[in-house]
Structure formats: C-alpha cells, structure tokens
Image (cartoon, rainbow, N blue to C red):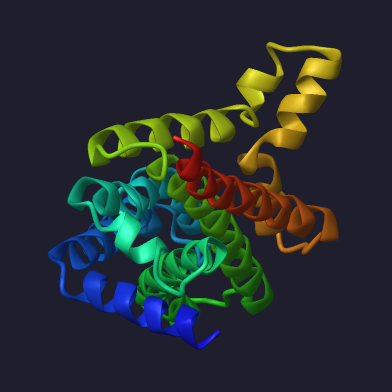
Amino acid sequence: MSRVIALIKKEILLMLNSPIAYIVAFVFVMVNNWLYFERFFVDAQANLRSYFSFFPWVFLFVIPAITMRLWAEEKKNGTIEFLLTTALKDWEAVIAKFASALCLVLFILVCTIPVPLTVAVLGNADTGAIIANYIAIFLLAGAMLAIGQWISSLTKNQIIAFLISLLILFALMMMGQPYVLSSTKGLVADIFRTASTATHFESMARGVIDVRDGVYFGSLITLFLFLNIYTLQNRHWK
C-alpha cells in the first residue's frame, strides 16, 4: 500500500506541476458556469438541475484530456518498463494512476461548489438533490476515467488516446438519449438503455440513489481497470 500511495503522490505532483491540470479545471468550471448562468437569470428559478446536466457533456472532453497522458506518455518516454519492473506490481500502478486522476476530478468538482452555494443563497435549493448530483457525477467521472485510462495504455500517441476515448464516451452517452432510444425497438433499445452512462447518471441526478446505478458504475470501473491491468501484463508476451 505504501508503494501505491507513493505513486499517487508522484502522479498528483506531476499534475500540479503541469499547466494542463489548471487549464482543464478552469475550462470545466468556466464552461459549465457560462452554460448555466446564461439561462439562470432568464428563468428566474433557483434550479440546479440544468447546471449539473451540463457536467457529463463537458466531461466528454475533460476526462480524455486527463487520461490521455497516463500511460501514453510513459510509453512515449520509455519510462513504462522502468515503472513496472520495480517492486511495483501492475495492478498497483493501475490503481495509483486511477486514484491520482480521480483526485484531480475531485479538485475540479470542489471548484464548482460556489455555484450551488450561490444559488442556495438566492433561493431554496434542494440540498439532497445537490448531494445526489455530486455523487452521480463522481461515479460517472470514475467510470469515464477507467475507460480513458485503459485506452491510454493501448497507444503511445496522446492525441489518438484522446480521440478514441472521446468517441467511446460519446457513444455511451448517446445510446441513452431519448431520440436514439425512440429510433430503436425491443431488445436493442433495452440494451442501449442499460448500457448507457446517460441513463444511470440521469436516474441518480433526479435525487434517487438506486443501488443498480451504483453497481453499473462500479462494474464499469472494475471492468476497465481489469482490462488496463491485462493490457500491461500482456506486454511481457510481445
């Protein structure tokens, strides 16, 4: 565990020493605030649901920007073998990188808290709904990070990792959109609805924490972290 913690600290320091982390956090906060407050004073309602609804779509670009370097940069610089031939095990390295990226996402979400606080002062905001939305967003971000991190382990090119992650995450979001579901029927529609990240996020964002939604996001995280470990282990056979 001490090795994992040491690598988490190293990854966090690398992020903090890079302007990318601050740019990503700034862009995320500013874009969400602009999209929300553009309508806030027109609607004249202390309703945060529209604010949180923008998060998944902005995350489509933010998460790939965070994960694209996690393994691709190690491969490009030739440091991946040094990292994984030390006492550190493959699964420890995967968990450490995932945890450090999750810490960055948590930092970004903390930066968004002033908006709910401001709305709460201006009106009667639903505290329970706000908490439920943050839980939903955190779980969604975790699933997106796991997918993006696995994609990053498949290539040396950060741009390729970014684009493939973006396409996969976009597809998972689109599968649950009403106009997509309405164009499909029967089993296909049920599969799309169940597999879509949008479906489970919106379910939790309504303020009801369903165990099935938590299991869905937990399963996605576990699956893609396992695939990440498998990819790293498979390098020994190449």
- Expressed as whole percent of the image width and height from the top left, the position of residue 91 reads 56, 63
Identify which residue, 210 or 97, lies in the foreground. Answer: 97
Q: Is residue 226 above or below residue 25?
A: above
- Expressed as whole percent of the image width and height from the top left, the position of residue 160 reads 29, 32
Residue pictured at 38% horizontal, 55% vertical: 36
Identify which residue, 214 or 14, lies in the foreground. Answer: 14
- Expressed as whole percent of the image width and height from the top left, the position of residue 205 reads 65, 57
- Expressed as whole percent of the image width and height from the top left, the position of residue 63 reads 39, 51
Outermost residue, front direction?
237
Residue pictured at 52% horizontal, 42% vertical: 234
Identify which residue, 168 or 237, lies in the foreground. Answer: 237
| Quarter-of-image position of residue 25 | bottom left
| Quarter-of-image position of residue 154 | top left
Q: Answer with left or right where residue 126 lies relative to residue 146.
A: right
Is residue 85 something one can see in this rendering? yes
Q: Is residue 23 above or below residue 12?
A: above
Is residue 37 something one can see in this rendering? no
Quarter that holds the N terminus? bottom right
| Quarter-of-image position of residue 26 | bottom left
Quarter that holds the C terminus? top left
Q: Answer with left or right where residue 20 lies relative to residue 229.
A: left
**How many numbered circles does the render carry?**
0
Q: Answer with left or right where residue 130 lies relative to residue 4.
A: right
Q: Is residue 52 above or below residue 155?
A: below
Outermost residue, bottom direction?
2
